[in-house]
Image (cartoon, rainbow, N blue to C red):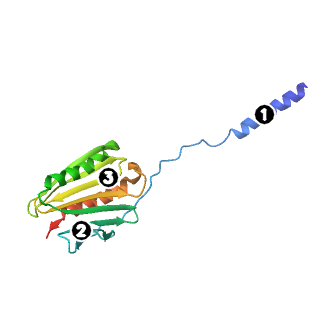
Amino acid sequence: MLKKIIAFSAIIAVSLLVFSCKDDVLPKPSSYLRLDYPEAKYVNFENECPFAFEMNSEAVIKKETDCGFTITYPKMKATIFLTYKPVTKNINELLRDAQKLTFEHVIKADDILEQPYLNPDKKVYGMFYQVEGNAATNSQFYATDSTRHFVTGSVYFYAKPNYDSIMPAASYVKNDMQRLMETLKWK
């Protein structure tokens, strides 16, 4: 009986020595998703509507209703929605509606950055909003000449709002929206 216990103990000891002599386990280095987007090339967009602007040549534009457009980025599953409304002594109402649309996202947003835009030469005045956090939209803007024209734009992604995951695409589209707003001109 004593021989069996000693033999069993020896087998366990040798097994522990053999199986515990592995290389040290090292943690895997962090990896990051690499998202390469093409460098934006802009083209002028103009039709019968009372405004024109520059847009990314990779995007697909489609007229919806009464000078409202969707600008789609199929590879990013993102769409910019543009809406045009004529100003008919209702500028305060249009401004209030545009601001209300942005601040409805305050529940999910971590922060909303406002960037005023003024271009007196082209008579384009507006506000660009960058919404940080898991809100439905990450960027919005409105632009007006205060007397005849009013344009709003907002971007939506066809994915669950997870700011960290869509941030590279959101940043790319945000830059395109800012370019659109800054190149906006009235006819």
Q: Which residue is mark 3?
A: 138
Q: Earlier in the sequence, mark 1 or mark 3?
A: 1
Q: Work out whether residue 144 can be spotted.
A: yes
Query: Alpha-carbon distance for marks 2 and 1?
Result: 81 Å
Q: Earlier in the sequence, mark 3 or mark 2?
A: 2
Q: Is residue 38 visible?
A: no
| Residue 95 on image: x %, y % | 18, 52
Image coords of residue 117 (percent x, y):
16, 55
Q: Give whichever of 30, 73 is nearer the camera.
A: 73
Left or right of 151 in this view: 1: right
Q: Choose top left, top right, bottom left or bottom right for residue 187.
A: bottom left
Q: Which disc number belongs to residue 12?
A: 1
Residue 166 rendering spot, x and y as whole percentages: 39, 54
Q: Amino acid at mark 2?
A: Cys
Q: Residue furthest right?
A: 1
- Please give the name of the residue rendered at 22% of the width and 52% of the height, measured from the top-left corner: 97
Query: Type of residue at label 1?
Result: Ile
**Residue behind mark 2:** 67
Return the x and y of residue 177 as percentages of the image width and height. 26, 60
**Mark nearer the viewer, 2 or 1:** 2
Tag 2, which secondary structure?
Answer: loop
Q: Separation of disc 1 and disc 3 at Cα?
A: 61 Å
